[in-house]
Image (cartoon, rainbow, N blue to C red):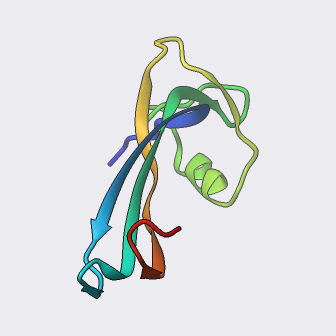
Amino acid sequence: MNNIESYKGTGIFIIVERIYNRDALNWHGIGASLLQVHRMVYQLYRKQDVYPEGKKITADNISLWQRIKILSGAHLIQHNSADNDTRFALDYAGSTFKGTPVNIPGLN
């Protein structure tokens, strides 16, 4: 609850794609085809130290007034943390579907 850790994206991604063949109407191999591409994108984040008024804040030393200023959009200065803590976080997860109305084997 008192955790005020801040992380900044590094631009390093891991992309996991899974391709599924979905059932579609078919008569002896002639019919529609449906393909689902499921994608999950993770980004590496680096822990940041936060300095709202020139002094590093932590969960122990932040005041109520500083919290209000941060929530209202005060300018924050961030620097990479000394402990070099990094984490992967999920940035995107979703699916796209690609369909072909008539699929005849051997004919593109």
In this view, the residue in front, 22 or 13, is 22
From the viewer's perspective, is residue 86 above or below residue 21? above
In this view, the residue in front, 61 or 44, is 44
Does 11 sit left or right of 76 as displayed? left
Across and down, in percent, residue 16 comes to 39, 43
- In terms of image quadrants, where is residue 93? bottom left
State the residue at coordinates (38%, 74%).
34
- In terms of image quadrants, where is residue 102? bottom left
State the residue at coordinates (67%, 60%).
72
From the viewer's perspective, is residue 60 above or below residue 41? above
Across and down, in percent, residue 53 comes to 72, 34
Across and down, in percent, residue 29 comes to 28, 77
Does 69 sit left or right of 17 as displayed? right
Across and down, in percent, residue 79 comes to 66, 23
Does 60 sit left or right of 78 as displayed? left
State the residue at coordinates (38%, 76%).
33
State the residue at coordinates (53%, 67%).
108
Q: Which residue lies furthest to the right in this view?
A: 75
Does 100 sit left or right of 55 as displayed? left
